[in-house]
Amino acid sequence: MSQDVLSTETNRRQLQQIIAGLSDGVILLDPDQSILWANEAALAMHGVAQVSDLGANAKAYAKRFALRYRNKHGVAVDSYPISRVARGETFSDVLVEVTPADDEARTWVHRVRSLVLADSRGDPESLVLIMDDVTEWASAEQRFEKTFTANPAPAVICRLSDLRYIKVNPGFLEMTGYSRDQVISTSTYELDVLEQAEHKELARQRLCEGATIPQMQAELRLADGGSKQVIVAGQPLELNDEACMLFSFVDMEPRHKAEIALRQSEERFAKAFRLSPVPILVCGAADQLVLDVNEAFLDTLGYSGEEVRGISIAQIDFFEDRHARIQLFAALEKTGSLDRIDVRVRRKDAGLIDCTVSADTVNIQDTPCYLLVLMDITERKRTELELVAAIEEVMKDASWFSRTLIEKLANVKSVNSPKLPSVSLTELTARERDVLGLICEGLADKEIAARLKLAPNTVRNHVAAVYSKLAIHSRSEAIVWARERGLFSSAWRPKGQR
């Protein structure tokens, strides 16, 4: 054996001993393209147990393993890293996906570089492939790529070394109208997302330092020459082992339009609130503190704005009946709205006004509030009461009343307005219901006593109990109360027709 051959064999054994324990995968090839040796790391990266499983040479390797680039395009056989190094080429950082031909479910990602070892005469003596298993990194990058692309928030990524954009997602393209080719590889000086930033100098400084850029308002230039109000922020990250900056954006146009619409709506409400001739009050739902009242409210009740704004309705005490106020707000809390509830309101000078109250729940600056609208019905009430008083006067002898007239009385007395929850017929005793029924027939106390075989005083006591429980004050009101609820209509017959 010649000295040169011995020297070559010795060098290879020494080289093998040196690289056997390396974490990098190493494959040695002879200049004739035959695979001589591979360390354990290289075998593991191909899922094989011995060198022969890689194939005898570069051509055999290409039959056993399919290679693709990261864009999923297949690698031509003569472009395989093992084929290129066999031709004596040197290269670095070639990323390929490696899949066994007999097991397509298994795939590794290798970052490969080559090394050509020459002898003393400069001729190739050993060809070396050095590879890193970057499967986990590639998988993480792929997940990031999917997340970045699917993220609805507009975003771009620029490389800090040259401040050029290397990635852009569909959200940014849709928001700005640019095409992908108009953004990728473009300098941040050409497409400056910080040009009109609220704190441009701070943002520029942070960009140069590769530090986080806090959220700030900015005006972004669009592809059509227009501009858009946005919130921009920058987050440093590493991508492909390079320092980068991720710019993310929030389109402020929808919010801006919503704010304008809300402001216009509030302006319309404020004008209607101020100019309405009907008294209106707004109070907090939780504490019933008066937030605002209109001029009609102040004029009608005789208060000044300072005397009511910021004061609770209970403290102002303009409801004549405290229990009616408590009942009204309890019903409002339960149902959220009320329609034309009869109340009596006390003016500052102690004068009383008959009103109907309509109320609804509104949100003001995200706080639930009640809007109360008061309608003065004092004149209408006075007219109704005068009519009822006249009818009550003639009803002292009601024996001649017809059924039709009694029904009309019920219609006159009712103002067709919903009432707050009141007493029901079930709260009367059986005897009190009998008495109420006979009142509706038009019988006087003595006649009721004779019909029920009771003493006149006992009948008067039952009548008083009925008045108290139903919150009424006369026989006509008792008849109207019963007619409004459809009670006793089938049993009622006027005197002289029984």
Image (tube, grey):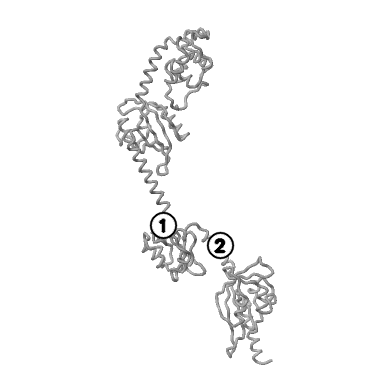
Q: For the residue carrying disc 2, how many other residues have a C-alpha within 10 Å: few (<14), some (14-19), or many (20+)?
A: few
> Which mark is on residue 186?
none
Q: Is residue 455 above or below residue 60?
A: above
* Residue 428 position within the rendered picture, expressed as x and y whole percent measured from the top left: 51, 19
Q: Label 1's element?
A: strand
Three-letter amino acid code of the residue under disc 1: Val
> Which of the 4 quarters of the picture holds residue 86?
bottom right
The alpha-carbon separation of the residues under discs 1 and 2 comes to 27 Å
Question: In the shown orientation, is residue 322 left or right of residue 86?
Answer: left
Three-letter amino acid code of the residue under disc 2: Arg
* Residue 282 position within the rendered picture, expressed as x and y whole percent measured from the top left: 38, 37
Q: Label 2's element?
A: helix
> Which mark is on residue 143?
2
Q: Nearer the viewer, residue 14 or 188?
A: 188
Sequence-first tag of 1 and 2: 2
* Residue 419 position within the rendered picture, expressed as x and y whole percent measured from the top left: 45, 27
Farthest residue toward the front? 224
Q: Are marks 1 and 2 in contact (CB under 8 Å)?
A: no
Q: For the residue carrying disc 1, how many other residues have a C-alpha within 10 Å: few (<14), some (14-19), or many (20+)?
A: many
Kindly identify the residue that appears in the image at 59 percent across and 86 percent down: 118
Q: Nearer the viewer, residue 45 or 474?
A: 474
Q: Which residue is mark 1?
A: 230
Q: Is residue 153 above or below residue 44?
A: above
Question: In the shown orientation, is residue 218 left or right of residue 447?
Answer: left
Between disc 1 and disc 2, the foreground one is 1
**Can residue 125 be seen in the rendering of this structure?**
yes
